[in-house]
């Protein structure tokens, strides 16, 4: 292991450089749509994995774009990477895509960085944001722009929160980290690479991050499916979790009462 750079600094350097590469590809390749997305995914993965392997040769890597090596499941240190989070947003010319480089140690999201290339920003676990402003009079809640789960809409309505959509999971999580939103709630399908780096950064920033039932988020599981997520200001976490629990209980009662 290269003792000359911390895990967080390594994650930031890798994520930032990958973001710059993706911007260059989008500006100069002449590609668009799915072809641009595929080119970005592959080029980003091809930059990140050799860099991490050279800097941390004893660690394992779980990447969305590379065949999984099952030996990682017995490793203590595993990098969990989404080389281009929000491929469709990137390919479609939108701004809300990200690069995720996270590190899980014994299953916990310990270090990482999320680059937002179109904002010229990279948030890392060694650089928490300044103190958060007081909560606004009306909470701001960010969710998936294209597939907002019904439970998210119902929780937003119960809170009378302003609900707005964004692209990648990293972009949404960093909106809470940098103060543009107060709550990011997701249910219905994600994988470890969608949230490891964002959760590491959010926790380092002093935010709440958990499953939507309040359970801790764990990484480097045999099955990388990690389908739900809550990142929010700590002041509202209990209220959001209670609303989700009530919503799920009501849904279960409705399902039980439905004719079979």
Image (tube, rainbow, N blue to C red):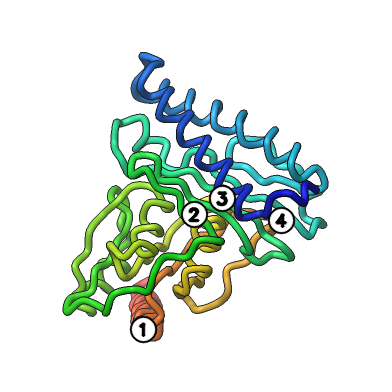
Percent position of residue 93, x then y: 29, 31
Q: Quadrant of the C terminus?
A: bottom left
Residue 253 picture quarter: bottom left
On residue 235, the disc is 1
Side (left or right) of 49 relative to 27: right
Q: Could you tell me which residue is drawn at 34 percent across and 59 percent down?
A: 175
Q: In terms of sequence position, does the residue under pointer 3 or pointer 1 come before the other?
A: 3
Percent position of residue 10, x then y: 63, 47
How far apart are labels 4 and 1 at the CA level? 33 Å
Q: In terms of sequence position, does the residue under pointer 4 or pointer 2 come before the other?
A: 2
Labelled pair 3, 2 in contact (Cβ < 8 Å): no
Q: Nearer the viewer, mark 1 or mark 2?
A: 1
On residue 190, the disc is 2
Q: Nearer the viewer, mark 3 or mark 2?
A: 3
Q: Could you tell me which residue is drawn at 31 percent across and 65 percent down?
A: 179
- Could you say whether the residue bearing mark 3 is in a helix, strand or loop? helix
How far apart are labels 1 and 2 at the CA level? 25 Å
Q: In terms of sequence position, does the residue under pointer 3 or pointer 4 come before the other?
A: 3
Q: Nearer the viewer, mark 3 or mark 4?
A: 3
Q: Nearer the viewer, mark 3 or mark 1?
A: 1
Q: Pick whichever, 247 or 148, lies toward us.
A: 148
- Res. 183 visible in picture: yes
């Amino acid at each position: 292991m290269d003792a000359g750079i911390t895990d967080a600094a390594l994650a930031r350097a890798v994520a930032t450089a990958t973001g710059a590469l993706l911007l260059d590809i989008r500006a100069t390749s002449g590609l668009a749509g799915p072809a641009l997305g595929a080119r970005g995914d592959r080029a980003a993965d091809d930059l990140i994995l050799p860099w991490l392997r050279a800097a941390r040769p004893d660690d394992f890597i779980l990447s969305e774009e590379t065949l999984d090596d099952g030996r990682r499941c017995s490793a203590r240190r595993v990098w969990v990477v989404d080389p281009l989070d929000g491929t469709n947003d990137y390919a479609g010319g939108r701004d809300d895509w990200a690069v995720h480089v996270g590190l899980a140690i014994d299953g916990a999201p310990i270090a990482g960085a999320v680059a937002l290339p179109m904002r010229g920003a990279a948030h890392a676990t060694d650089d928490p944001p300044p103190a958060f402003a007081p909560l606004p009079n009306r909470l701001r809640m960010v969710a998936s722009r294209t597939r907002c789960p019904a439970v998210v809409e119902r929780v937003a309505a119960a809170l009378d929160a302003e609900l707005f959509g964004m692209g990648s999971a990293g972009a949404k999580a960093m909106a809470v980290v940098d103060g543009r939103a107060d709550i990011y709630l997701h249910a219905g399908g994600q994988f470890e690479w969608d949230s490891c780096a964002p959760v590491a950064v959010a926790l380092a920033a002093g935010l709440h991050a958990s499953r939507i039932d309040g359970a801790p988020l764990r990484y480097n599981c045999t099955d990388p499916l990690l389908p739900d997520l809550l990142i929010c200001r700590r002041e509202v976490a209990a209220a959001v979790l209670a609303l989700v629990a009530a919503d799920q209980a009501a849904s279960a009662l409705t399902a039980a009462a439905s004719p079979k």
